[in-house]
C-alpha cells in the first residue's frame, strides 16, 4: 500500500462522538512511552502528523487520522496512566473500554509492545481482556532498533511464548522501528489485505 494522503481529522473525549463513517478503523493502543506517535508518523510518512511528547501518557483523547480517504488510523490514549489521579484513571479506562467494546467500525486493534522489555503484566492483562471480549487484535513490537539483534529476537520470542501459555493461536504481529522504517511495508500490506477483503 502506498500512502497518498494522511490527515488529522478530529479528536474526541467521548467514544460515542467519533466519526460516523463506514471507513474501517485500525486503532493503536499501548502503555505510555511505547512510541505510538512516532510509529504513526513513520507509517504514514508524515513527520509531524501525530504529536510526539517527552511527557509519557499525554494523549487523553481519541484521535482519528484519515488515510488515503478510505480508512482511519486511530490513536487511543495509553493505558498505565502514569502520574494521573484516580478520577482521570477511571475516565480514561471508561473511554478506552467503550471504544474497544462498542465501536462497530473498529476493524483491528493493535497493541503496541516495547521490544526492549520483558513481558509486562499490564500488557498481558490488556491482551487477556481483548481475548475475553472477542476483540480482533494484533501486536506491534516497537523500537526494534534499540536492543541488540539477539536481544530483540529473544524479547519477541519470550513475549510470544508467554502468550502461548494462554492462547492456542497467536495474533498477527509486526516488528517495527520508527527510526529505520522496519515493519512499515508489512503492516501496510496487512491493512490493505483486510481492506480488500471488506469490499
Image (cartoon, rainbow, N blue to C red):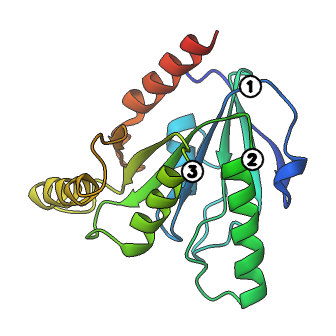
Residue at 67% over, 72% down: 58
Give the left or right position of residue 143, taking residue 105 as reference: left
Q: Where is residue 69 in the image (x, y as percent from the top left)?
A: 74, 22
> SS class of the residue under badge 3?
loop
What residue does disc 2 label? 102
Number of numbered discs present?
3
- Name the residue tied to disc 1: 23
Residue 1 visible in the displayed image: no
- 160 sits to left or right of 35: left
Residue situated in front as seen by the camera: 198 or 4: 198
The part of the image, by quadrant, that contains residue 91 is bottom right
Q: Which of marks 1 and 2 is in front?
A: 2
- Mark 3 and mark 1: span between their CA atoms? 22 Å
Q: Where is residue 25 shown, x and y percent of the image?
A: 67, 34
Please state, as top left, top right, bottom left or bottom right, where the C terminus lies in the image: top right
Q: Are marks 3 and 1 in contact (CB under 8 Å)?
A: no
Instruction: Mark 1 or mark 2: name the one nearer the start of the chain.
Output: 1
Q: Mark 3 points at which residue?
A: 133
Marks 1,2: beta carbons within 8 A: no
Residue 115 x, y percent position in the rendering:
30, 60
Mark 3 or mark 1: which is in front?
3
- Label 2 SS: helix
34, 195: nearer the viewer: 195
Q: Residue at x 44, y 59 (%)?
A: 128
Q: In the image, is residue 8 above or below residue 38?
A: above
Give the structural element (helix, strand or loop) at label 1.
Answer: loop
Among the two numbered marks 3 and 1 on one chain, the one whose residue lies closer to the N terminus: 1
Q: In this view, does 12 lie to the left or right of 25?
A: right
- The image shows residue 35, relative to residue 43, as above or below, that is below
Residue 105's image quarter? top right
Amino acid at each position: 500500500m502506498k500512502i497518498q494522503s494522511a490527515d488529522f481529522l478530529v479528536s474526541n473525549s467521548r467514544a460515542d462522538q467519533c466519526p460516523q463513517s463506514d471507513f474501517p478503523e485500525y486503532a493503536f493502543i499501548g502503555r505510555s512511552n511505547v512510541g505510538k506517535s512516532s510509529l504513526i508518523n513513520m507509517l504514514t510518512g508524515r513527520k509531524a502528523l501525530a504529536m510526539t511528547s517527552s511527557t509519557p501518557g499525554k494523549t487523553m483523547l481519541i484521535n482519528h487520522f484519515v488515510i488515503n480517504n478510505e480508512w482511519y488510523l486511530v490513536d487511543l490514549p495509553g493505558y498505565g496512566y502514569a502520574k494521573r489521579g484516580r478520577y482521570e484513571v477511571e475516565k480514561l479506562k471508561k473511554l478506552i473500554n467503550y471504544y474497544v467494546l462498542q465501536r462497530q467500525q473498529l476493524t483491528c486493534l493493535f497493541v503496541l509492545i516495547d521490544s526492549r522489555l520483558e513481558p509486562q503484566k499490564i500488557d498481558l492483562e490488556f491482551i487477556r481482556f481483548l481475548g475475553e471480549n472477542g476483540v480482533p487484535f494484533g501486536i506491534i513490537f516497537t523500537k526494534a532498533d534499540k536492543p541488540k539483534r539477539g536481544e530483540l529476537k529473544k524479547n519477541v520470542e519470550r513475549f510470544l511464548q508467554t502468550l502461548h501459555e494462554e492462547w492456542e493461536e497467536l495474533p498477527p504481529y509486526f516488528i517495527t522501528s520508527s527510526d529505520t522504517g522496519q515493519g512499515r511495508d508489512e503492516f501496510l500490506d496487512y491493512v490493505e489485505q483486510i481492506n480488500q477483503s471488506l469490499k
